[in-house]
Amino acid sequence: MSISRAVCIFIGLFIISLSTITHAKQIVSIEKVIYSEQEFIDAFDGKSRSEVQRKLGNPDKKAMATRPESADQYTEKAGDTRLKKDAVEMWYYSRIVKFNDKKTYKLIELTFANDKCVNFSFAF
């Protein structure tokens, strides 16, 4: 009985170690791709949020654009204020765009207007 118990324990430990190794390989395979500025712009300009998320993963941070308090008085002068307002959202990623061979930008902001990537900002 003790031999069969030892065999069961050995098989159990073997299965656990295999699952751990497989999980570790999956984590390593999701490596960050480092883009040059132009590669990044070409890859994501005009893309939807879902396309960007599929390639880059979840952003480090998200923010919604806010209107300044006095914006209405200026937009009324500019024209019809009954027009549909754009939905603007910013996504932030870190250290995925290089600006030379050895250094990457600390923070990258992608601005989405109505679900399309329309602007990029790179910060040191």
Image: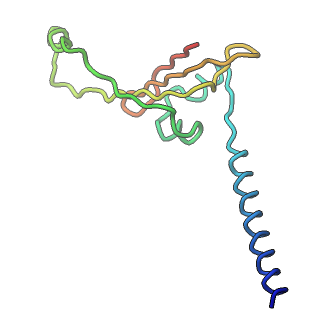
Give residue 29's position: percent from left, percent from top. Answer: 72, 46
> Position of 7 compared to 45: left or right?
right
Q: Which residue appears at 24% of the width and 15% of the height?
A: 68
Residue extending farthest to the front is 2
Q: How is the image coloured?
A: rainbow
Give residue 64's position: percent from left, percent from top. Answer: 35, 28
Residue 83 picture quarter: top left
Q: Which residue appears at 81% of the width and 87% of the height?
A: 2
Residue 40 picture quarter: top right
Q: Which residue appears at 23% of the width and 28% of the height?
A: 84
Q: Which residue appears at 77% of the width and 76% of the height?
A: 9
Q: Quadrant of the N terminus?
A: bottom right
Q: Quadrant of the C terminus?
A: top right
Residue extending farthest to the bottom is 1
Q: How many marks?
A: 0
> Position of 43 compared to 81: left or right?
right
Give residue 78's position: percent from left, percent from top. Answer: 19, 10
> Position of 52 compared to 18: left or right?
left
Residue 37 picture quarter: top right
Nearer the observer, 43 or 54: 54
As drawn, 76 above or below 25: above
As drawn, 20 above or below 38: below
Give residue 121's position: percent from left, percent from top. Answer: 51, 17
Nearer the observer, 121 or 16: 16
